[in-house]
Every structure is written in structure tokens, then in C-alpha cells.
Amino acid sequence: MDLTAVAKPCSFGDKGTSDVVLRLRNSEGRPEWFYSHSSVLVSKSGFFADRLSNPGSGSCIEIHCSDSTYDHHVNLLRLLYLPTNSLLDSLDSVQSALGVLPLAIAFRCENITNCCIQYLEAVPWEDKEEEQIVKEVLKLGPVAMPILARIQPMDLSATKSVFISAVRFATSIGGSCPPFGDELKTSAQEQVEFMLGGDEDTPLVTADDEVKSVVKSGLSQVCSLFENELSSFLLVPDITAETAETRILQCLSDVEWMCNILPKMDLMKDFVCSWGEMSRKILEIVEDKKLDNAMWVLKVKLIEVTGKVLEAVGYGNVILPAPCRVQLLKTWLPYIRKIKPLLDAKADEDTDFPYKMDEDLCQSIEGAIVSLVLALPSNDQADILSDWMKTEQLKYPDLSEAFEVWCYRTKSAKRRLMEGLDRVGNTTISL
């Protein structure tokens, strides 16, 4: 076959000008003949160029294909007849491009391969398509790897930059972005939580000084916003106003979000300190007479956040000096002791009352308080236990376990003291 002859214009399947027949088996298993042209095959495919350069190849080439790839083989043959600048526009779906690509690589059709890669790299993918694309590309090797550019891991500096931007948005550093500020902020918070998952780069990002500085600024921002909204609430003519309550609860939700993510960055101590600093002001407001029968959801949420703080300190995850631990207990213990029976009474009056301390919350707070009390100096323990026994609300939180341990320790300490004095006395006599 003369491969040096000047190529004449031809079209796929044109029997009158065909000098090569390609034989494929169709989906029913019967052979199907495709009339082709050596000039096209040789110029567009390395595979066909090698086959047709062999003097003994003849004018018929048989191609083996499976039922699942039959249509893609036919599509590839059609693409061989298109001008290079029309190839990209001829691809109309992820499935067709993904089906043709491995064949284009196998038949060494460089232009078609490049167009399939360019198409798949650029178009949107459905979730199921993404899984299939990843699977196929990994089979095809380095030549197809550009397709996966969108899901390649970022370098550390890029990850850090995205994380910082998300934290700024999630904590409203620089102000909100109306009209979709709240929705975008919530989305940013979700993404920050996702990025703090079990990824191997997470510790490297969260340990960065700039990242920690931005997160601490975010904590200061959300706490400040919450304090300001809460402080201005009592000045509102109608304290039952839904908009004012919504703003306060949104700000508290941001504070709670910070409480949830900071332990993942070893910054829970910063939250505990911030919460301790604003606790007195918070309680002054929520215990105002105007709120005696209002804002129950706020009161429960405050206890939930405080519970997490008590757990962090009580179980030693956050280390604070004894005076700070005593102050934390003396600030919140009376409020918890007061609010629990009020919530229970409201629930008894109205079975549909939604704001209550569930059993898990009660147990976790009680356990944290007992642990916290037992880690205090004995005199501070005595003050807190004495105050507990003077109140009418002995049932919750129940500090009887802490009282029993304190009594045992006190007796043991006295016994050790007496034993020590006896040893000193005996030593003096022997001298």
C-alpha cells in the first residue's frame, strides 16, 4: 500500500474512496465493517501507521473490542476524520470523553488524547462521575493526570491561606457581608470544621503562629459581639422582640462554635479564659428581673457552653491556677443550682416546654464539678461544700461524693500530721 500518495478529501464510511477496511464486532457479536482511508489513519494514529507500514498488513484490519467499548471505538474512528480544531467541540459528555480517552491513548492518537484530557479537566463532574474519572485516570497513568488537577492536594501555604480566609469569614473579622452574610458565615464555619478533620496536614496548619493569631482574633471578635448584643438587650423596649433575641442567639452560637473547634487547635485555654472574663457580666444581665420569665433558650445555651468549660478545666485538659478554678466555680455554681429547678418546674407545668437540661448534660456538668472541686486546695473545697450544704438545692449538682472524699482526706491529713508530730517528739526524747 502506497502511504506516500497525496491524501484526497474523504469521509468516514465512504466505500467509493476507501482503501482500508476496519473490522469490529458489534454488540450482538457479529462483525461490522467500517470503510476507512489509510491517509487519515496513518496521519492521526501511531497504531495504524505502524500496522499499515507493514507490507503484509493487507487492506483489512481487525480490531478486538468488548461490548462495553464498542460504541467508544466507533466514536474514536469518527473523531479521526475531524479537523483538529473541531475535536473539542465534538465531545458532548463526560462519559463519551472518558470512554474515548483510553482508546485514544492505546491507538496513539495524540490530538484526540489531548482534547479528551482538556475536556475532562474543564467540565463539571457529578459525584459518581468523579469516582469513575479518578479510577480510570489512575489506570491510564501520568499522561492523564492533568485531569485530576482540581482534586490534587494543595501545598501547605495554599491550605493555610484558605484556612485563614475561612476563619476570618466564619468569625466576621472585618465585618459581615450582607445580604448573604449569615449564610456564608455558616458555610465558612462548616468548612473550617471540615478542614480540622483528620487530614495529615492539619497539625502543620493549626500549629502555625499566623493561623493561631487569626483564630485568637476571631475568638475575641465573637465574644465581643456577644457581649455587646447581650448588653444592649436590656435597653430594648420590648425584650420579647424576636429580632433582638435572634441576634443574641446567633452570636452565642458563634461563641459555641469557637468552643467546639478550639480544642482541635490546642487553644481551649484561650476560650476558657475569655469565658471566665465575661461570665460575671453575662450573669448580671441574664439574672435581671426583666428576664425572669424570658429567654429560656439563652439560659440553657449558656449552661451548655459553661458545661464544656467546666469539663475542660475539671478533667485537666485546661490547666488554670487554683484561684481561677475557684472563681469559675463560685461564678457558675449558684446559677446552675438556681436555673435547674426553674427549668424542671416549667417542664412540669407544660409538657411541651422545649428548654430543659437533659440527663446527659446534667451528668456531664455534675461530674465535671465534682472533679473540679476535688482538685482544689482543701480550704477552698471546704468553702464550696459548706456553701452547698447551706442551700436548699442539695439534689443538683449533687456534691456528696466530693464531700465524702474531702472528709476522708481531712481525717487522713490529720492522722498523718499526728504521726509526724509523734515522730518528731520521739526524736527529741532520744536526743
Image (tube, rainbow, N blue to C red):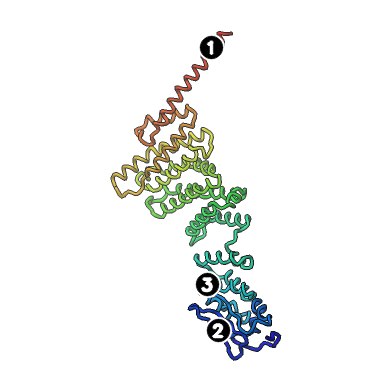
Residue 165: % across, % down:
57, 56
**Pair 3/1: label in front:** 3
Q: Residue beneath label 3, please?
A: 95
Give the SS element for disc 3: helix
Label 2: how many Cα within 10 Å (few below 14, some 14–19, many 20+): some
Say if mark 3 contacts mark 1, CB within 8 Å.
Answer: no
Q: Which amino acid type is marked by label 2? A: Trp
Q: Which amino acid type is marked by label 1? A: Gly
Does residue 348 sit above or below 64 in this rendering? above
Q: Residue beneath label 2, please?
A: 33
The residue shown at (64%, 68%) is 143
* Of the image marks 3 and 1, the number of the one nearer the N terminus: 3
Which quadrant of the rendered structure holds the C terminus? top right
The residue shown at (62%, 82%) is 83
Residue 59: % across, % down:
63, 85
Seen from the viewer's position, the closer of residues 92 and 331 is 92
